[in-house]
Amino acid sequence: MRNHDFVVQKIVRPERTVSGPWLEVIASNLDYHRATFLWKCEGLSDAQLRLRPLGSSALTLLGLMRHLQGVERAWFQRTLAGATPHFFPYRTYVTADGDEWYDESDATPAREVHEDYLKACEESRQVFARVTADLARIVPNPEFGDTDVRFVLEHVIEEYARHVGHADLLREAIDGATGE
């Protein structure tokens, strides 16, 4: 496979801030988890990102990428900024549990999904300082009930932690690549 066939090119994960002001630690850890997710997708083709390599799961790396752009926009833009985010119109379906998930028959090229994900992350970075100015601010949250800003930030990190773990398993099953 040629290098230009890869959707996600070389990823360099940033150093994390491990002490200091809490918001700097959170922001750096968010960027670290974002980069770690992309690292799990690095060097794969569109077809590989669409693979369902685990028989017990319908998850794909591309489906996780679609989901994480939604996480970024839902939590940073809609919940914290009170804005109406622009969600890319990916095809979805309702699961047996009643949740909405991304339909892998969506033909959007993986490069476009990747660009949309990067855009969603940048949109989150752009509103971060403004939406975290008052960490005790209560925000309406239909999923958990009213929460403060700290909870939302923790929840986004929780989303990344869970899905980076999924990505780790998916990547290993696709081509044997492992690492942290």
Image: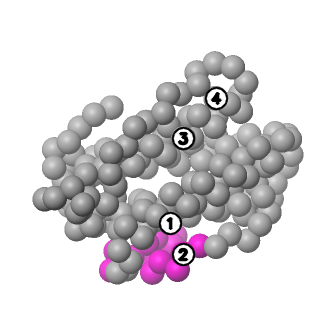
**Mark 1 in CB contact with mark 2 (< 8 angstroms):** yes
**Element type at mark 1:** helix
Q: Write the residue at 81% across / 54% down.
A: 139
Q: Write the residue at 42% across / 62% down.
A: 114
Residue 31, disc: 3
Judging by the rendered image, the residue that carries numbered circle 4 is: 25
Q: In this view, does 23 lie above or below 18?
A: below
**Mark 1 in CB contact with mark 4 (< 8 angstroms):** no
Judging by the rendered image, the residue that carries numbered circle 1 is: 116
Quadrant the N terminus occupies:
bottom left
**Element type at mark 4:** helix
**Element type at mark 3:** helix
Q: What stretch is highlighted in magenta?
A: 87-105
Mark 3 / mark 1, whichever is N-terminal: 3
Q: Is residue 102 above or below residue 131?
A: below
Mark 2 / mark 4, whichever is N-terminal: 4
